[in-house]
Image (cartoon, rainbow, N blue to C red):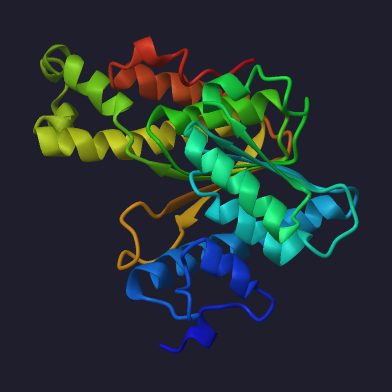
Amino acid sequence: MSEKHDIKPDQSIELLKELHILTRDGKLNQDSRRKLKQVNHLCQFIEPLLNEVRQNHGVTLVDHGAGKSYLGFILYDLFFKNSNDSSHIFGIETRDELVEKSKDLARRLEFPGMSFLKLSVADSIESDLLPATVDVVTALHACDTATDDAIRFALLKKARFIVLVPCCQAEVAAHLRKNKGQVLAKQAFTEIWRHPLHTREFGSMVTNVLRCLQLEAHGYQVNVTELVGWEHSMKNELIIARYMDLPRRRPADRLKEVLQTLGLEDMNQRFFTSL
């Protein structure tokens, strides 16, 4: 496939080279084409959310587990670099070398509306380096409980939109495994996760079901879809939540019931339904 079909007309070639998506001579290899497709495809989902916020004011977006900040840089390049509003993107990352490289790149590209903070997702909740409220929260492949911390952050910051691509959900599976013997003796349907492989796969799915119910219990409308096809990534579940102030009782009751049914009552604090 020709590179011109993968690179958007207004994307910065210099940025794509800096992110090592393009080679020095402007070419795409197979791995970088996959990365570019993933991020550009996610941007297609995020663009209408940004446009909706910008009808009233500039966008404040916080990207958790930013890594090399592919998402933040590409969003800024596509949607913010030529704007004159107060939009700002914050990249949250724990690895100091990645934070410093992102800061340096933003300076060189003259992207003043980008900031990078060396914080865990959990620590960012209490940090005074971030605004009291934000418009959009993203977490792309934030591993295991970091996705749940991003949800907590978004709820406390009253985010209008939450965009998640969950990854490596191990905590629920660990709790299922711990309580397996006790629960297996009571109900036949627990055969679904009797075998270790099934425990892991079922635990991953249940994690995201619980997250969706939690978001609904806080008034969000939730949509779950695929980010890209299986040929590009095995971690392709995309959760988009839009705050609509919807009724909360039914999803809160369902969340509690699922936790009780699966023997996960000790995870009530993780999947809280009230702030």
Q: Is any atom of residue 251 visible in this view?
A: no
Residue drawn at (88%, 55%), measured in percent from left and top?
Answer: 55
Q: Whole-percent x and y of residue 69?
A: 55, 49
Question: Is 118 above or below relative to 49?
Answer: above
In the image, residue 169 sits, relative to residue 187, either above or below, namely below
97 or 250: nearer the eye?
Answer: 97
Q: Is residue 131 left or right of residue 142?
A: right
Front residue of 75/57: it is 75
Residue 267 position by quadrant: top left
Decide if residue 240 is on the left or right side of residue 87.
Answer: left
**Residue 248: image location, x then y, percent:** 63, 26
Quadrant in which the N terminus is drawn: bottom left
Please report the residue visible at 41 percent of the width from the left and 27 percent of the height from the top: 145
Depth check: give the residue in front, 84 or 52: 84
Q: Where in the figure is residue 177, as x and y percent of width and height?
A: 18, 21
Q: Quadrant of the C terminus?
A: top right
Quadrant assignment, res 129: top right
What residue is shown at x 56% (from left), y 26% (from top)? 119
Residue 275 appears left or right of 172? right
Q: Residue at x 46, y 24 (%)?
A: 255
**Could you tell me if residue 158 is visible in this image?**
yes
Q: Locate residue 51 relative to residue 102 in the image: left or right.
A: right
Return the x and y of residue 4 as percentages of the image width and height.
Answer: 54, 86
Q: How many marks?
A: 0
Picture quadrant where residue 29 is located: bottom left
